[in-house]
């Protein structure tokens, strides 16, 4: 197959400041990372929570990902920065939270990064890496990313993906960074494609997800087809790793697999609830990562860029908020992290509902910044059905009439969100019972609120300023009249002009 290479049409004009960083392979080794230039194979699947066999799911069939975990390290508590596609991917590829890099909504709805953000492939290029991406980038502008090779088709042909990846792996002697993106398990939940999975599951083969709070034939059918998508993804990962083995480079390749956020059903994707933020993360590197390692530390996807850069002996920008995982993987380390943070701005204009959240090992605080309207995602879910996609025959309100009281209360909180929500994730892992207002939890709520405010200050969160929040809200309200789920003919977004101080000239977006 002939490789098609795309040249970068534009370069970033204003680099990030690299002060006090690890600038050599030797320094990287001292920091706990490998001292060579390994290949990096980054595998990202859409809408995939920890619904894998190696994470204890008893229904799904994922032998290849389970084997990958056996051969490396499985992280049990990993959380994305935002449970929305473009925003999460922007964090994976920049090491910055969306409010820092500017990608605060879907790329397909014309949101885009700040022009002075330097993505991961660009930093790796300075270490002599060639880079490629298979599948969708979904971050704007594409010209900001120094990928040497791009291949994207709207398909779930896992054989073709493996074939294209194999050609890229053996095309050059330079170390490579290859990001492979799988469309599964994004909606629509395709039961079977190209013969995969060979034996699809049906609704009677599975149980519904507890966090959804309801159990109907419709929800079980959706869950079964979600599992069928994950099984097809697993087959694709197996084919991809076979190509890596055939290339002879498996032993010098760092393999990383993760989901970009949780699945589609309500109270998951596009929320700050656990089902949206919690994802699988598996890493394998023969000779560098002990097989069968399991880590329960709090890990964030802002940690991925520092981890990859450290492994490559590349410069790690000092302003990245995450930290390399190598000290955690390779030996004893100081206490890792007490708090994790996440956020949400908008999926697209009708689903604008800014939030911030913080969690420690047991408790989570969600701060809802909009108090003059119901949560639009809940409103849409109300109309769409229990899985947000699977059925239009019976609305959520119909199903909730027979749900337990705590479930109905949880959906009421989801729709009419209070200023703050507090959950005990040990006794209430599905976040059904908001503890705000209970005196015995007041100190915990105050502690988490203070930690969140400190993080917002350290990361220069623009929405701590009421005027910026008001401007962002007004701009989204104005964009509603241009919203069309098919054409997305928006005028240019202006939030770059007021969300940060200083002058910034956006790079051009791709044509409509």
Image (cartoon, helix red, strand yellow):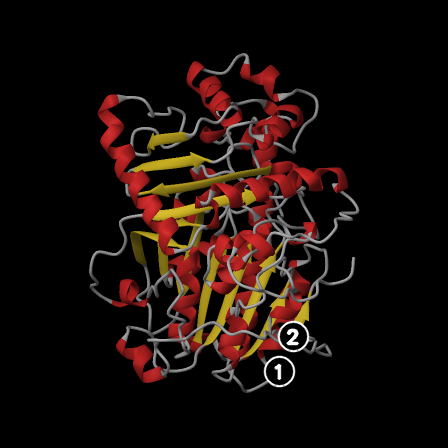
User: Residue 122: x, y in percent?
Assistant: 54, 75
* Image side of residue 331 versus residue 306, left or right: left
* Image side of residue 83 versus residue 314, left or right: right
Residue 139 higher or lower than 366, as above or below: below
> Which residue bears the numbered disc 1?
171
Q: Nearer the viewer, residue 225 or 454?
A: 454
Q: Nearer the viewer, residue 149 or 73?
A: 149
Residue 192 higher or lower than 39, as above or below: above
Q: Which mark is residue 108?
A: none
> Which residue bears the numbered disc 2?
149
Residue reaching furthest to the bottom: 173
Q: Are marks 1 and 2 in contact (CB under 8 Å)?
A: yes
Residue drawn at x 21%, y 63% is 333
Q: Quadrant of residue 357?
A: top left
User: Residue 107: x, y in percent?
Assistant: 65, 54
Residue drawn at x 59%, y 81% is 170
Quadrant the N terminus occupies: bottom right
Residue 510 higher or lower than 271, as above or below: below
Q: Secondary structure at mark 2?
A: strand
């Amino acid at each position: 197959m002939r490789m098609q290479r795309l040249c970068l049409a534009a370069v970033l004009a204003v680099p990030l400041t690299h002060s006090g960083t690890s600038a050599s392979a030797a320094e990287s080794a001292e920091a706990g990372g490998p001292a060579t230039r390994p290949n990096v194979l980054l595998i990202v699947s859409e809408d995939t929570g920890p619904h894998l066999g190696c994470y204890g799911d008893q229904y799904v069939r994922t032998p290849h990902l389970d084997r990958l975990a056996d051969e490396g390290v499985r992280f049990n508590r990993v959380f994305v920065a935002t449970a929305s596609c473009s925003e999460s991917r922007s964090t994976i590829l920049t090491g910055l939270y969306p409010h820092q890099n500017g990608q605060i909504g879907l790329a397909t709805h014309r949101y885009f990064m700040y022009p002075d953000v330097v993505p991961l492939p660009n930093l790796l290029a300075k270490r002599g890496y060639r880079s490629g991406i298979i599948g969708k980038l979904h971050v704007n502008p594409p010209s900001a990313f120094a990928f040497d090779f791009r291949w994207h088709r709207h398909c779930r042909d896992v054989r073709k993906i493996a074939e294209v990846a194999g050609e890229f792996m053996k095309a050059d002697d330079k170390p490579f960074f290859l990001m492979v993106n799988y469309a599964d398990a994004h909606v629509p939940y395709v039961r079977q494609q190209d013969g995969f999975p060979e034996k699809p599951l049906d609704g009677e083969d599975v149980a519904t997800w507890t966090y959804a709070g309801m159990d109907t034939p419709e929800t079980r059918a959706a869950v079964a087809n979600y599992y069928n998508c994950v099984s097809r993804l697993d087959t694709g990962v197996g084919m991809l790793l076979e190509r890596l083995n055939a290339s002879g480079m498996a032993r010098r390749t760092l393999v990383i697999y993760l989901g970009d956020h949780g699945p589609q059903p309500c109270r998951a994707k596009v929320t700050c609830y656990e089902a949206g933020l919690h994802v699988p993360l598996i890493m394998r590197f023969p000779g560098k990562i002990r097989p069968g390692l399991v880590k329960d530390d709090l890990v964030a996807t802002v940690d991925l860029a520092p981890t990859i850069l450290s492994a490559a002996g590349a410069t790690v920008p000092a302003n990245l908020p995450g930290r390399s995982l190598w000290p955690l993987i390779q030996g004893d380390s100081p206490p890792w992290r007490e708090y994790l943070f996440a956020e949400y701005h908008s999926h697209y204009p009708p689903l604008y509902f800014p939030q911030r959240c913080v969690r420690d090992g047991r408790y989570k605080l969600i701060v809802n910044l909009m108090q003059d309207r119901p949560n639009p995602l809940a409103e849409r879910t109300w109309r769409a059905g229990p899985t947000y996609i699977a059925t239009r025959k019976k609305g959520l309100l119909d199903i909730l009439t027979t749900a337990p009281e705590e479930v109905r209360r949880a959906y009421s909180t989801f729709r009419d969100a209070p200023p703050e929500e507090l959950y005990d994730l040990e006794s209430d892992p599905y976040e059904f019972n908001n503890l705000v207002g209970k005196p015995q939890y007041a100190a915990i709520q105050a502690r988490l609120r203070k930690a969140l405010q400190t993080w917002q200050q350290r990361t220069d969160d623009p929405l701590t300023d009421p005027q910026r929040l008001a401007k962002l809200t007004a701009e989204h309200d104005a964009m509603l009249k241009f919203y069309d789920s098919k054409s997305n003919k928006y005028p240019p977004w202006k939030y770059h002009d007021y969300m940060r101080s200083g002058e910034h000239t956006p790079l051009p977006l791709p044509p409509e």
